[in-house]
Image: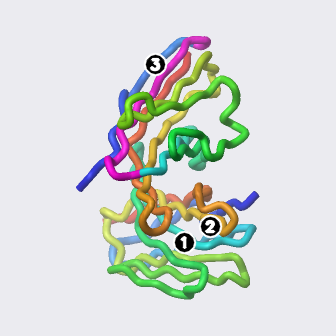
Amino acid sequence: SQQGEEDPQALSIQEGENATMNCSYKTSINNLQWYRQNSGRGLVHLILIRSNEREKHSGRLRVTLDTSKKSSSLLITASRAADTASYFCATGSPYNTDKLIFGTGTRLQVFP
Amino acid sequence: EPEVTQTPSHQVTQMGQEVILRCVPISNHLYFYWYRQILGQKVEFLVSFYNNEISEKSEIFDDQFSVERPDGSNFTLKIRSTKLEDSAMYFCASYTQAGANVLTFGAGSRLTVL
């Protein structure tokens, strides 16, 4: 079954630094999405990258996708304390777009 | 901005009791999901629901679980006889038919089984 695995599991940085999180998956996909979860809350969609795209930007977020390596990265530039959260990648299969499968998540802590 | 609303926010129940978790998806959304997250762990897919029927379910979604959309707006998850291992956050999510499967999640219902 396809499954996203993020690394690192946890990341601590200072405000102003960049944070990079990686996601690997196992099967073919039609898109890959990143979501954010504040502690004890629901997930919020951040950005979607389609399988035919290699890079996408949204504000301070930059996502890359390498389908040959079945991996993606999320870069948050100039991080802020408010970016402290868990970040999950989620993949949608080209065979069944009905569901998203979430990875294990990266817990990001940004210190002021 | 439209929201997915879930109730209750927290429910404590005894093992073996029935629990119903409720969700009000965004009004023009057509695809509905339940996910769960055991504390500190990954977000796991339970079931997807479209056109008033289950479109897919995971291995977790056994005979103890059921979903329904009784009145065209509410979307419920029922656990017939709760077990200790059902303790988790349960998230409802939905998306509209237009565009990609970008999910809007509710804030979750925390279920504690004693």
Quadrant in the picture for residue A90: bottom right
- The residue located at (55%, 20%) in the rendering is B113
The amino acid type, in three-letter code, at marker 3 is Val
Residue at 51%, 65% in the rendered image: A11
* Label 1 crowd (10 A; few <14 / some 14-19 / many >=20): many
Q: Amino acid at mark 2?
A: Asp
Above or below, A47 against B114 in this view is below
Chain assignment, label 2: A
Q: Quick one: label 2 or label 1, which is nearer the N terminus?
A: 2
A14 in relation to B107, above or below = below
Range of residues picked out in magenta: B15-29
Identify the secondary structure beneath mark 2. Answer: strand
At 59% from the left and 56% from the top, the residue drawn is A98
Amino acid under label 1?
Met
Pointers 2 and 1 in contact (C-beta within 8 Å): yes
Residue to which mark 1 is pinned: A21
Residue designated by label 2: A7
Other-residue count near label 3 (Cα within 10 Å), few / some / many at <14 / 14–19 / ≥20: few
CA separation in Å, label 2 and label 3: 34 Å
Mark 2 packing: few (<14 Cα in 10 Å), some, or many (20+)? some
Relative placement, left or right, of A8 versus B73 is: right
Q: Which mark is residue B12?
A: 3
Q: Secondary structure at mark 1?
A: strand
Q: Main secondary structure of the magenta part?
A: loop
Q: Which residue is at the front of the view, B63 or B6?
A: B63
Query: Foreground: B40 or B27?
Result: B27
Instruction: Look at the image and tell me whether residue A85 can be seen.
Output: no
- Could you say where residue A40 lies in the image, as x and y percent from the top left? 41, 43
